Amino acid sequence: MKSIDTLDLNGTYSYADYLKWEFEERLELIKGKIFKMSPAPPTRHQKIAGMLFAEIWQLLKYRDCQVFIAPFDVRLPKFDVQSDTEILTVVQPDISVVCDPMKVDKKGCIGAPDWIIEILSPGNTRKEMNNKFDVYEESGVKEYWLVEPNDEVVFVYVLIGEGKFIGLKPYTIGQALTSITLPDFTIDLNQLFDKK
């Protein structure tokens, strides 16, 4: 299938369907529903993603945890489902940190990464803040950062014992932010949001 117009956008699809598609547009599946990804992100989005990836990669290059940058498929099955036809959520977070090497295979990641970072762009805010928030929480992502370049703020959510995210105080310019998952990773937000 070459054209997304041939799909019923109200239908329910699985990862097996997703693997057959050859569209130019990038898509994500969230609970079986198709979400079109924004066109190429703005330059500032890419600079922020690149800086975070480079800093995390530098920290992890000799460790078991691995960091991946989009496009990188993260399949979030319900329970212990492994069949491609039963997986209804496949997303491409901007940055994924996976500390369990058994979750990484040739197709990407199966199961929840330990830490996900999403950078908001015009057109993806509702998806990142609602739909993805819910599936990341349900699947057990331990730490979720939402980076808002326009307002220069980072929202941090941490999974607590009851399997629910709690939001920490927002982080802004003039502060440094330390990861809960990787406590030796700290980023200066003046540097992250530098507009040069």
Image: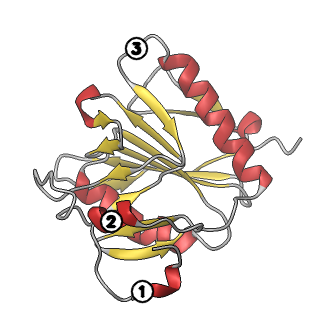
Q: Quadrant of the C terminus?
A: top right
Tell me which numbered mark, 1 or 3, is placed earlier along the sequence.
1
Mark 3, residue position: 63
Q: Residue at x 49, y 65 (%)?
A: 22
Q: Quadrant of the N terminus?
A: bottom left
- Type of amino acid under label 3: Arg
For disc 1, the marked residue is 9
- 10 Å crowding of disc 1: few (<14), some (14-19), many (20+): few
Q: Is residue 75 left or right of residue 97?
A: left
Number of the front mark, 1 or 3 = 1
SS assignment at label 1: loop
Q: Nearer the viewer, residue 50 or 108?
A: 108
Indicate the position of residue 73 as horizontal and vertical percent values.
Answer: 41, 50
CB of mark 1 within 8 Å of CB of mark 3? no
Q: Position of residue 171 (x, y in %)?
A: 59, 46
Looking at marks 2 and 1 on the same chain, the residue that comes earlier in the sequence is marked by 1
For label 3, the crowd category at 10 Å Cα-Cα, with few meaning under 14, some 14 to 19 and many 20 or more, is few
Residue located beneath label 2 in the image:
134
Q: Is residue 51 visible?
A: yes
Residue drawn at point x = 31 percent, y = 47 percent:
141
- Distance from disc 1 to disc 3, alpha carbons, whole Å, reads 41 Å
Q: Earlier in the sequence, mark 3 or mark 2?
A: 3
Element type where label 2 sits in the image: helix
Residue at the extreme top: 62
* Amino acid type, callout 2: Asp
Q: Amino acid at mark 1?
A: Leu
Question: Could you say where residue 156 lies in the image, as x and y percent from the top left?
Answer: 47, 49
